[in-house]
Amino acid sequence: MPDEDLIYDKIDTPLFHLIGEAADSLGVEAYVVGGYVRDLFLYRPSKDIDIVSVGRGIDLAKAVAERLGRGAKLSVFARFGTAQVKKGDIELEFVGARRESYTPDSRKPFVEDGTLQEDQERRDFTINALALCLNADRFGELVDPFDGLDDMDNLTLRTPLDPDVTFSDDPLRMMRAIRFASQLGFFIDPDTFAAIGRNRERISIVSAERISTEFNKILLSPRPSVGLELFEQTGLMEILFPELLELKGAETREGIGHKDNLTHTYKVVDNLAKALASRPRREEDLWLLWAALLHDIGKPRTKRFDHRLGWTFHNHNYVGMKMVSRIFRRLRLPLDHKMHYVEKLVDLHMRPATLVDEGVTDSAVRRLLFEAGDDIDDLMLLVEADITSKNPQKVRKYLDNYSLVRQKLTDIEEKDRIRNFQPPISGELIMQTFALSPCREVGLIKDTIKDAILDGTIPNEYEPAYAFMLCEAEKLGLTPQSI
């Protein structure tokens, strides 16, 4: 843990002294609190700066905005007793110190003015209850009434007060505990962990949007399995994501067993997270991680035992793809192109392995390129992450096979331009050539041209496709009409 003098140096900046001077001019105490202070001690970047004043939080925001001068934008939220000040890259949130009380059916508190310690007591975890004073006579002084610094040293997540009260008051804090454990690599204190299990049913009063926000952060953490396993062990998975829990367990029949698909899923998501960490983060990465999480979600519903073949999960990719929209709707996740991307990858995740098993033919590669389009590279990342064998030789064999598929994909794309291709003959041209209205024959001819290109019968070019169209139309008794 860094020396407190180093932390003083971190806040010994014109901005924090300006806030302290504004507080002194109003005769109020001002502190930078919460995640910003925690991240200073953890050497993590943090842009959101929360300022608590003991009284008159909005007045302090106004005074700070005035001192920042031209370009400073002040937003006041009187109903909530908060204010925001923005200028350039600076973003400050102001609130007066408060104490809170809750009713059993809501996580929205009744708020009253309070002391600094009462404000720190309402924080979710001791590591988020640290405060650094900004007033001139105590500038940089750390206020840590719940030994949050010791908990940080011990990599421990603990609530400032009785965890049963903390989690019952605001059940979202249970998800936040799991998220912080996954993001920061911290352990949840045993009493705190046990309280999550006791209060897990309280999660029902939290909106799906809030839960999904925390869950997404778990997926984006360095090792998502840490959070996913805690999500399972606390009993929250059973309530919030029963389809995922259905993957748990292995069964043996006639001496033939299958792997625990939940443990396998954890490994796949971790493998993918590790692969993604080696390149710049993209918005699509979250949804690629969702595809990894859901890639086998259809297995429990397709599991069968065959005396000759053993355990089978036929069409689990298709069944899983159909489940994606129901899960996204319930969790209030996007129902737009992001969901369709996840559906596509869940549906296609078996195809590269099938290519290897059945032979990497040009025709099969063209069809995979056509169906995956620009998402083909993400699909290959997913299927490579899906290799979770403990046998190094088997892993090497699978990776070598997928390298062959990747090379074939590159070769076919360079030669035939199949990725996201549109057949060179449109439905409109077919109707114009044969004087047809929209009808079954138009669709048949168009599909036949597409299949001929994907099968390599004709090149992906206009002249050969036009000639092929004339031949196929003749088989249907159609002749070109003069214009």
Image: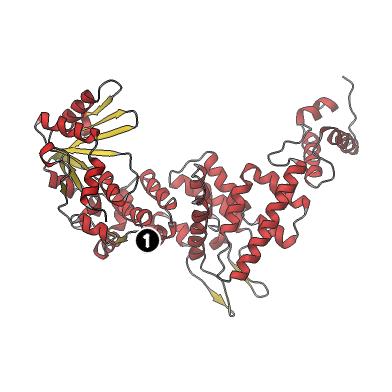
Instruction: Write down the quadrant of residue 86 in the picture.
Output: top left
Q: Nearer the viewer, residue 457 or 9?
A: 9
Q: Position of residue 358 (x, y in %)?
A: 74, 61
Question: On the rendered image, what quadrant is the N terminus found in?
Answer: bottom left
Q: Position of residue 10 (x, y in %)?
A: 26, 43
Q: Does the rendering let one see residue 442?
A: yes
Q: Nearer the viewer, residue 270 or 32?
A: 32
Q: Which residue corresponds to the image point at 70% horizontal and 44% vertical from the top-left?
A: 370
Rendered position, 147 above or below 131:
below
Callout 1 secondary element: helix
Circle 1: residue type: Leu
Question: On the rendered image, what quadrant is the C terminus found in?
Answer: top right
Q: Which residue corresponds to the image point at 37% horizontal and 53% vertical from the top-left?
A: 183
Q: Which residue corresponds to the image point at 74% horizontal and 43% vertical from the top-left?
A: 414
Q: Position of residue 113 (x, y in %)?
A: 12, 38
Residue 221 as seen in the image, left or right of residue 144: right
Name the residue that disc number 1 marks.
Answer: 230
Furthest-bottom residue in this view: 255
Instruction: Write down the quadrant of residue 161 in the picture.
Output: bottom left
Furthest-left residue in this view: 27
Residue 254 as seen in the image, left or right of residue 108: right
Residue 68 as seen in the image, left or right of residue 28: right
